[in-house]
Structures are given as C-alpha cells and as structure tokens.
Image (spheres, rainbow, N blue to C red):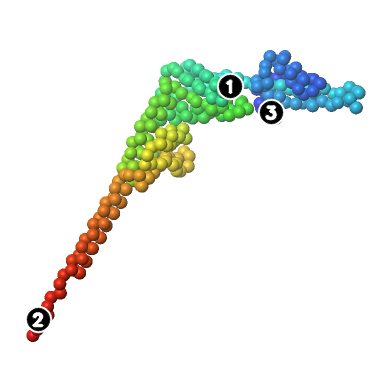
C-alpha cells in the first residue's frame, strides 16, 4: 500500500482493463516502463457480469513511477551541500542493491570530519532517504578522496598490533569506541589470526572491540604456566631424592653406658 506522502512525490497514471493484469499492461505501455520500474495500486479489481452474460465492471489501477535512486541520493546531497555553502561534484553508481557515491571538490576534509564521523553521519542520512524510496534494501557507500580505503588500511595495522600485544601479554586488549563499519573491519582482520579472538562490548555510540587472548595457544600466560609446571616437577624430584637418601641411610649404633 502506498502512503499518502509517497503519492505526492510520485508520478502516476490511472488505467482500466478487463482484468487487473490488463490494466497494468495498458499503463506500462503508455508510460514506456517495465514492471520493476513502477509501483501498482489496485483501485478496483472489476467484476464479472451475471453468469458471464452481461457487461462487467472493468478493473482500475493506479501505476506510480518509481524515482531513480541515483537521482534521489544526488538531490538530497545537493540540497545539503548548498546549505553548507560547498561546491561538490557527485558521482553515483548503482549496481543491484549497492549504491556507491563518490564526492570530490574543495574542503573535503570538512566532509570527512574527525575519524570520518561527518562522512559516516552523511552516509547514514543518504541511506535513510534512498531506502525510503526503494522496495528493497539498498546498501549506500559514501566516500571521498579514498578515505574508506585509507581508513581500512589503518584499522588493519591497528588490529594486528593489538592482537600481537594480547597474545604476548595474555591480557584482554580494549580498543576505543568505533562505529559498526570500523568494528566490522577489526573483526574481519583478526578472524584468522592465531591465538586471539574478538568480541564487542558496550552500547552505541560507545561500543568497542575487545581482543581476547587464547592462553592455551602461546603467549606470556602460557609460558608462565609452563614455568610453574617445571618448578613443581623440580620440587617433586628433590623431595623424592631426599626421601630415598633418608631411607638408605644406616642407623647409628647405640652406645652402651
């Protein structure tokens, strides 16, 4: 069912036919569109005449033209940048359920923000707007100056460094709070890293990744355990030697008075 607000923003035509399918076909032919480019609202399913002998009421449909998702994203961003006083070149690429948007121009650092927070917020807003106009979920990726790629490399290096520290010390390592995308990169990077596992703790926006050492696979903690076992074995061997020495020792003769 199409909501009233959506109707106002969508172009449509109303058509009739002997059946609902015929009415939809008539509308598609006139609009020059295919079924995946429209949304159909059935006004009247029609009715057959008595015993099929008399005239029947025709089916009526209202066919709405879907908005182009590229244009939806572009229009939203243009309005935002105009309000910010920025001139930004916007390039979009829609492939199945993925919409990639690349921005270029001056003052891109302003759009990226601290650790990409501004870019992430803008991406979230674009995703809301695009998915409101789409029947299926569209994954939106917003990037500028290859920030996403550079950020991924930085996080991968950080992940390896933290994992090595956790494995060496045998202690949990807590990373700073990160957004879901950054946490996903950390988890993916360390998925096959021997000796550690990862989990997330806390609530948004303070949720963070925790790198947990597996002490039975090496590291300082395991080394300490091995040293403790070695010391215990050494202590037990000394006790056995002392017992044997006492057993083999001959008793002293009693001196008669």
Q: How many marks?
A: 3
Kindly indicate whether the residue at mark 3 contacts the one at mark 2 (C-beta within 8 angstroms). Answer: no
Point out the tag, 2 or 1, that comes first from the N-terminus. Answer: 1
Please provide percent x and percent y for residue 155.
39, 32
The answer to whether residue 82 of the structure is visible from this angle is no
Residue 136, above or below 13: below
Q: In the rendered structure, which disc, 2 or 3, sits on the residue that comes first in sequence?
A: 3
Badge 2 vs badge 1, beta-carbon distance below 8 Å: no
Residue lying at 20% horizontally and 69% vertically, measured from the top left: 247
Q: Which residue is mark 2?
A: 255
In the rendered image, the quadrant that contains the N terminus is: top right
The residue where tag 1 is placed is 69
The numbered mark, 1 or 3, whose residue comes first in the sequence reads 3
* Residue beneath the point at 79% across and 26% down: 45
What residue is rendered at 36% in x and 47% in y? 216
Q: In the image as oriented, which residue stretches furthest toward the left? A: 257
Q: In front: mark 2 or mark 3?
A: 2
Counting from the top left corner in percent of width and height, residue 57 is at 85, 23
In the picture of the structure, the residue carrying the numbered disc 3 is: 2
Task: Classify mark 2: helix, strand or loop.
Answer: loop
Residue 243 lies left or right of residue 204; in this view the side is left
Mark-to-mark CA distance, 2 and 3? 116 Å
Which quadrant does the C terminus fall into?
bottom left
Residue nearest the viewer, comparing 177 with 233: 233
Can residue 115 be seen from the camera position used here? yes
Q: Distance between the Cα atoms at labels 2 and 1?
A: 112 Å
Cα distance in 3D space between marks 1 and 3? 17 Å
SS for dot 3: loop
x, y percentage for residue 217? 35, 44
Q: Quadrant of residue 97?
A: top right
Asked if disc 1 and disc 3 are in contact, CB closer than 8 Å, the reply is no
């Amino acid at each position: 069912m199409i909501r009233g607000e959506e109707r106002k923003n969508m172009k449509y035509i109303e058509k009739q036919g002997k059946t609902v399918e015929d009415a939809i076909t008539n509308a598609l032919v006139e609009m020059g569109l295919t079924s995946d480019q429209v949304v159909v609202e059935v006004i009247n399913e029609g009715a057959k005449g008595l015993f099929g002998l008399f005239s029947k009421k025709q089916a009526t449909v209202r066919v709405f033209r879907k908005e182009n998702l590229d244009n939806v994203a572009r229009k939203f961003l243009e309005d935002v940048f105009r309000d910010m006083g920025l001139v930004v070149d916007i390039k979009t690429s829609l492939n199945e359920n993925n919409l990639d948007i690349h921005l270029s121009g001056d003052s891109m650092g302003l759009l990226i923000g601290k650790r990409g927070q501004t870019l992430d917020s803008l991406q979230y807003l674009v995703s809301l707007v695009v998915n409101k106009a789409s029947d299926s979920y569209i994954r939106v990726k917003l990037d500028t100056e290859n920030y996403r790629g550079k950020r991924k490399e930085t996080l991968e290096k950080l992940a390896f460094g933290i994992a090595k520290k956790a494995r060496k010390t045998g202690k949990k390592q807590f990373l700073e709070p990160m957004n879901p995308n950054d946490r996903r990169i950390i988890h993916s990077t360390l998925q096959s890293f021997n000796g550690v596992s990862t989990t997330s703790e806390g609530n948004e926006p303070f949720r963070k990744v925790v790198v947990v050492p597996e002490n039975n696979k090496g590291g300082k903690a395991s080394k300490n355990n091995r040293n403790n076992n070695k010391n215990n074995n050494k202590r037990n061997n000394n006790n056995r030697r002392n017992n044997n020495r006492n057993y083999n020792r001959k008793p002293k003769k009693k001196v008669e008075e």
